[in-house]
Amino acid sequence: MNRKIFFAAFCVLCAGTASAESLYDVYSLALKNDYRIKAAESAYLAGQEAANVAKARLLPNINAEGTLGKARRISKAESSNPFAVNIENVIDNDSPGYSVTLTQPLINFPGRHDTRRGEIAARLATLEWERARQSLIMRTADVYLQTLTAGAKLEAAESAENAFRLRLRAATMRYDAGSARGTDVLEAQAALDAASADTIVAKNNLNVLFDSLKGISGQDHDGLSALPDDFTANPPVPADMKQWVDSAIQNNLEIGIAKLRADDAYQNAKGRAKEHWPRLSGRLSYTDNYERRTYSAAVPDTVYQSGLSAMLVLSVPIYSGGGMSAAAREAKHRSAQETENSHGTSRDIVQRAHSSYMSMIAGVAALNARKAAIVSALRSLEFAQKGYGEGIMSMINVLDAQRAVYEARQNYADALYSYLIAGLRLKETAGVLSARDIEELSRRLDSTKKVTRPGFN
């Protein structure tokens, strides 16, 4: 029995001292297990082959062909002369052979534009892959920080519930002693019931976010490194908003992708407009075959043939039911559409850079104000408790002050999340977000202070 108790105590001690997982730990798992990043990697590898596929249309094409034919021809000669002999001949033909043909496109204007489109597709696949990696950083950080925020809110809710429980106990004791009114007990009970409901909701939200984090990393997480209590918010560096906007215009992946799509549509329109142009190709072929004939008289006859030919082939599409002209007009309109989309994307990104920068600046001020609000709420609670003890204030005043402390802590958690996400989004918009930002944020976490997954009871 003593060994069992010792083993159970040892397990509890180990669980309590186990290090919490940092944001970088979760991100490393997401790189290995997230299905979206795996799909994006496959799309990137496939896109890199687009240039080779398009280039192959202008390179030499060698085709080999082998043939094997058999034929039988029967001829009969019949005469009306009863004394004549009817003649029947059977001829069997065997004709195996092969041919090798080399074709080299010499002039193919649509093919040249298609080759450029292949190169654009390869660059586009690279940018899409980079955007997927940035998206993974944002998704991981967003869910992780939401989980920390939910953990802080649960901690505030449990603290408020415990405080209201103590208020109810004190009010009941004072009521039993005849120094408090019955309404004080009822008000304290109502506040405790509301706080219990808030705790249940907070637990559920935290469990849901832990599940969301598992959906990204592919593994369960029981304890995450929390943000320290003395977390300080700093303004963006560089402080000049214009530098962030210029960086977004030059480095933002969405702008780069939109420009490549516009260029691809332009090359497609130019290529489709030249479908009616002549095409010239050179063709070199070699053939080798023989024909063996066997007659009914069993006398074989073999004919050998081989040859080398070279030619220029000029192809001029004249009419295809109007399909080429329609395809050219469609490609022209698609090009105009992608050009306008590119301009719109640039404007949206510039506006987003402005908004993200201002959100981060406001986030610093809001976070400091929320931190000061907690201090003010605690002082107000202290005065309310003192006034209630002196009979100056009512239980309602104490409960309201306690609720204000709870709300101030909730608001601070929301403000901290908004500030951190605004900083990451600003870097994403500027096109400079990388795994290094995850490392820097992870170093600011407190591994000794954990956000753990709550139970379901």
Image (spheres, rainbow, N blue to C red):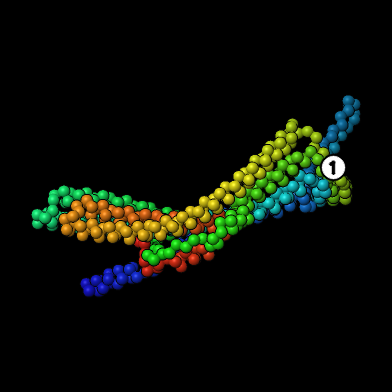
With 434 as the anchor, is 208 left or right in this view?
left
Q: Which residue is depicted at the point 71% across and 34% down?
A: 326
Q: How many marks?
A: 1
Between 247 and 63, the one lying in front of the other is: 247
Question: Quick one: quadrant of the C terminus?
Answer: bottom left
Between 237 and 322, the one lying in front of the other is: 237
With 360 as the anchor, is 451 left or right in this view?
left
Task: State the residue lying farthest toward the front.
Answer: 392
Where in the figure is residue 366, as x and y percent of width and height?
42, 56
Q: Which residue is depicted at the point 27% across and 57% down?
A: 380
Q: Is residue 15 above or below residue 53?
A: below
Question: Around disc 1, counting alpha carbons within 10 Å, would you say few (fewer than 14), some (14 to 19), or many (20 or more)?
Answer: few
Q: Which residue is depicted at the point 54% across and 50% down?
A: 352
Q: Is residue 442 above or below residue 249?
A: below
With 372 as the anchor, is 284 left or right in this view?
right
Asked if residue 68 shows in the view, the reply is no
Question: Quick one: quadrant of the N terminus?
Answer: bottom left
Q: Quadrant of residue 156?
A: bottom left
Asked if residue 18 shows in the view, the reply is yes
Residue type at mark 1? Leu
Q: Residue tagged by mark 1? A: 314
With 382 as the anchor, is 42 left or right in this view?
right
Q: Quadrant of residue 12?
A: bottom left
Q: Which residue is depicted at the point 74% across and 36% down?
A: 324
Where in the figure is residue 295, as x and y percent of width and height?
85, 42
Where in the figure is residue 330, as x and y percent of width and height?
69, 37
Q: Tag 1's secondary structure?
A: strand
Where in the figure is residue 270, as x and y percent of width and height?
74, 43
